[in-house]
Image (cartoon, rainbow, N blue to C red):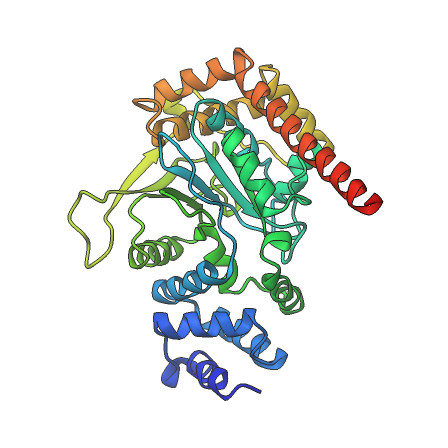
Amino acid sequence: MSNIFRELLKKVGSGNHTGENLTRADSYKATKMMLLGEATPAQIGAFLIAHRIKRPTGEELAGMLDAYEELGPLLQNINSGHPVIVLGIPYDGRTRTAPISPVTALLLASAGQSVVMHGGSRLPTKYGIPLVEIWQNLGVDWTTLTLEKQQQVFEKTGIGFVYQPQHFPLTNKIWEYRDQLGKRPPFATMELIWCPYAGDAHIIAGFVHPPTEGMFQQALTLRGVSKFTLVKGLEGSCDLPRDRTAIIGLSAPLAPQQEGLTAIERLLLPPRDYNFTTKNVPLETTEQLVADIQSVLSAKPSELMQTALWNGGFYLWRSGICSDMQAGIIKAEELFSNGAVAAKLQELTQIINSSKELYHIMTGLSHIL
């Protein structure tokens, strides 16, 4: 048993009257001790559920991110005309609405905007369809590549993926606790603003509950992050909804700070203003989703194409590639129509498959020698 961890546990688990929020340093220490297994299983389980009940603060999220930065993987800096976009999407996947973020990543990369994604496999508590599963069904398997190979793919294609079970195995044990507890602990909140990229980054994270936006704002400010976009998206993702006005927070680093926080500019985007129908595409089966995505890549009209244009237009504008939302939508339509997005997927598939073939050849030669 760790006496140091016990004291940290007492702070978050002592209830409304005597409990305390952790400092950034204490949160860093607690996260590191859990990842390294220095706390006992009983202590870790108790801490995760107590922290969930208490609710984390932005300062505590910043400390957790400090530990992830020290112990976790990082894709290295690449030459890019724009800050690399890092998409923070819930690791436990989607169950109700069709995800569009892999298409958004392909679209952005085809326009010269590099993107980093991160996540795992089917994970608690929702066990929804994860990013890697969608990519696998499109012919892109991120799960077996070493971080070095991921870096090479990232540099060549402008799309990188940090697969946590492979590249950050210290977190694997934590997922077992999350499954047994049946609730999303603050780790699940922190992961949305984790940045596994060492260069200039633009953090884009989804959220569900309004207080989460404030926590993100504080944590990112403490971490010195000045470029971020916070989206009240579909199922907590970065995907803009079509059934309601999209509520978005844009970092405004040149504006006066709000009580020590990077200022946020509120943006409201009604889909009707851009001639989009107010309807989200439901998630039916993985097979149907992949078929619909392939249809989008072939530039065929569909409901999912409307979602792709709605999201693509916004992110092309937000990344600085297009001057406004309408120009972004027109540019997105052009990139789908001229085959650039489909070509990016083909390029990605070929490079990853060639990397795997080379790995198998080198492995076979090592056995012979």
Place of residue 72 in the rendered image (x, y in percent of width and height, measured from the top left): 51, 58
Question: In this view of the protein, can residue 156 be seen by the observer?
Answer: yes
Q: Is residue 5 left or right of residue 323?
A: right
| Number of numbered discs on residues | 0
Spot occupied by residue 327 in the image (x, y as percentages of width and height): 35, 18
Asked whether, in this view, residue 184 is left or right of residue 226, the answer is right
**Residue placed farthest to the left in the image?**
256
| Residue 230 in view in this figure | no
Q: Identify the residue at horizontal 73%, vertical 32% (top origin).
A: 287
28 sits left or right of 218 in the view: right
Nearer to me, 333 or 209:
333
Position of residue 330 relative to residue 167, above or below, is: above
Work out whether 107 lies above or below 218: above
Q: Quadrant of residue 202?
A: top left
Residue 319: x percent and y percent? 36, 31
Rendered location of residue 86, percent (x, y): 45, 42
Residue 321, located in which quarter of the rendered image?
top left
